[in-house]
Image (cartoon, rainbow, N blue to C red):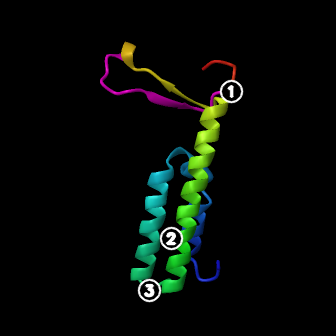
């Protein structure tokens, strides 16, 4: 399955931090890279299908990881009410669970 898939695409697929912090965005980038490689005739139609399936599987994995990280307290949503902004909040990444921010 991995034969014929460009190394640059595989490196993007294996960038777990980017996948977990932005699952939908990274999946879109992977899909676009796959389509571009197919348009340039770097990959066959069969490899394109494999790449798109791997991209979707990576997206589902990242969504699960993100949900688990939020559940155990690694991600926290903070209100911006005191900041005077209309934005709903921000995500804090990398907090040790139970230790505050």
How far apart are labels 2 and 3 at the CA level?
16 Å
Q: Of the residues under marks 3 and 1, which one precedes in the sequence?
A: 3
Residue picked out by circle 2: 52
Residue picked out by circle 1: 96
Residue picked out by circle 3: 41
Q: Secondary structure at mark 1?
A: loop
> Callout 1: few (<14), some (14-19), or many (20+) C-alpha neighbours within 10 Å?
few
Relative to 54, does residue 76 appear above or below in the rendering? above
Q: Secondary structure at mark 3?
A: loop
Please tell me whether the stretch drawn in magenta is mainly helix, strand or loop: loop
**Residue 40 shown left or right of residue 100 in the figure:** left
Residue 79 x %, y %: 43, 20
Kindly indicate the quadrant of the structure image that contains residue 4.
bottom right
Query: 42 or 19: nearer the eye?
Result: 19
**Residue 7 shown left or right of residue 24 in the figure:** right
How far apart are labels 2 and 1 at the CA level?
35 Å
How far apart are labels 3 and 1 at the CA level?
46 Å
Nearer mark to the viewer, of 2 and 1? 2
Query: 47 or 15: nearer the eye?
Result: 47
Q: Secondary structure at mark 2?
A: helix
Residue 39 x %, y %: 39, 81
Which residue occupies 41% across, 67% down? 32
Q: Which quadrant is home to the C terminus? A: top right
Q: Of the residues under marks 2 and 3, which one precedes in the sequence?
A: 3
> Callout 2: few (<14), some (14-19), or many (20+) C-alpha neighbours within 10 Å?
some
């Amino acid at each position: 399955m991995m034969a014929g898939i460009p190394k640059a695409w595989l490196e993007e697929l294996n960038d777990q931090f980017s996948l977990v912090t932005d699952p939908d965005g990274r999946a879109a980038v992977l899909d676009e890279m796959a389509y571009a490689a197919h348009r340039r005739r770097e990959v066959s139609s069969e490899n394109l299908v494999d790449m798109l399936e791997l991209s979707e599987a990576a997206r589902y994995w990242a969504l699960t990881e993100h949900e688990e990280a939020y559940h155990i307290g690694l991600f926290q949503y903070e209100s911006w009410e005191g900041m005077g902004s209309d934005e709903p909040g921000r995500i804090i990444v990398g907090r040790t669970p139970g230790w505050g921010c």
